[in-house]
Image: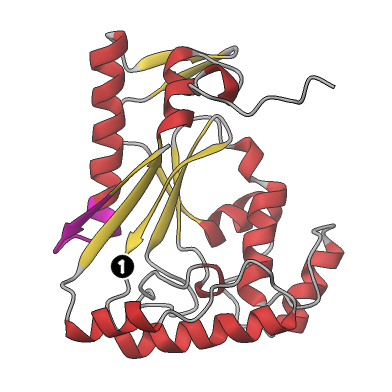
Amino acid sequence: TMIELYEAYADFQDIMKLTENLIAHVAQEVLGTMKIEYQGNTIDLTPQWRRVHMVDLIKENLGVDFWKEMSDDEARALAKEHGVAVEPHHTFGHVVNEFFEQKLEHTLIQPTFVYGHPVAISPLAKKNEQDPRFTDRFELFIVAREHANAFTELNDPIDQRERFEAQLLEKEAGNDEAHDMDDDFIEALEYGMPPTGGLGIGIDRLIMLLTNSPSIRDVLLFPHMRARD
């Protein structure tokens, strides 16, 4: 279960503010406090939450600097050196994300916006103007779980087609999670789309957090059950 929303003439930074204010407000209304307990951790939902670029987080904690220009081969070599598992088809952007997911995601207990995801894993997000290898996208992590995903929407149909074409090449190289071409979506963009920020929040995980529930099965009305035999 999730909520998805879009705001015209907003960017990912506006959506960050909306996200933290929304979740903090819900906690205050439901629990009467913004400081909650979750499985032995005291979580402070009081805004403003931490904001950190994915590359800076990796550099600060692992000493690996992905701000430097490097080839895909050089990035994969760094992954091997640091014990980060990658696939042969992984590009620079995929490697950066794998460093984060495998080494750092589990450490993010307090509310943290990790932003600046690589273009390779963000085919619908607008490129960052200062460094087009990355995007204006963020994910929200609380108790080491992703609770929200958002970005400044890509509203350039030419760039979007190029992204989908790159995704098709990734699929041919073995990436089963790559996007297919979506001509209808590109045609819609050609008619015009204002600058827009988009957000998706996982409702089930949010309810888990607010009710101190250890399993998602505890908050689903009809969870998948194992067969009796």
Q: From the viewer's side, name the closer residue of 12 and 147.
A: 147
User: Residue 12 lies in magenta, yes or no?
Assistant: yes
On screen, residue 173 versus residue 123, left or right, reads right
Q: How crowded is the residue under tag 1: few (<14 C-alpha within 10 Å), some, or many (20+)?
A: many
Name the spot of residue 165 as percent of width and height, x first. Answer: 52, 88
Name the spot of residue 127 as percent of width and height, x first. Answer: 39, 76
Name the spot of residue 97 as percent of width and height, x first. Answer: 62, 61
Q: Quadrant of residue 216?
A: top right
**Residue 36 vertical position relative to residue 7 in the rendered view, above or below:** above
Looking at numbered disc 1 in the image, what kind of residue is underneath it? Glu
At a point 36% along the width and 25% down the height, the residue shown is 45
How many numbered markers are drawn?
Answer: 1
**Residue 154 vertical position relative to residue 3 in the rendered view, above or below:** below
Name of the residue lying farthest toward the front: 229
**Residue 51 vertical position relative to residue 22 in the rendered view, above or below:** below
Q: Quadrant of residue 65?
A: bottom right
User: Residue 93 lies in magenta, yes or no?
Assistant: no
On screen, residue 182 versus residue 185, left or right, reads right
At a point 62% along the width and 44% down the height, the residue shown is 105
Give the extent of the magenta segment: 5-14
Q: Quadrant of residue 91?
A: bottom right
Name the spot of residue 4 as percent of width and height, x first. Answer: 31, 48
On screen, residue 61 versus residue 181, left or right, reads right
At a point 32% along the width and 17% down the height, the residue shown is 34
Q: Quadrant of the C terminus?
A: top right
Q: Quadrant of the N terminus?
A: top left
Q: From the viewer's side, name the closer residue of 191 and 116.
A: 191
* Residue assigned mark 1: 153
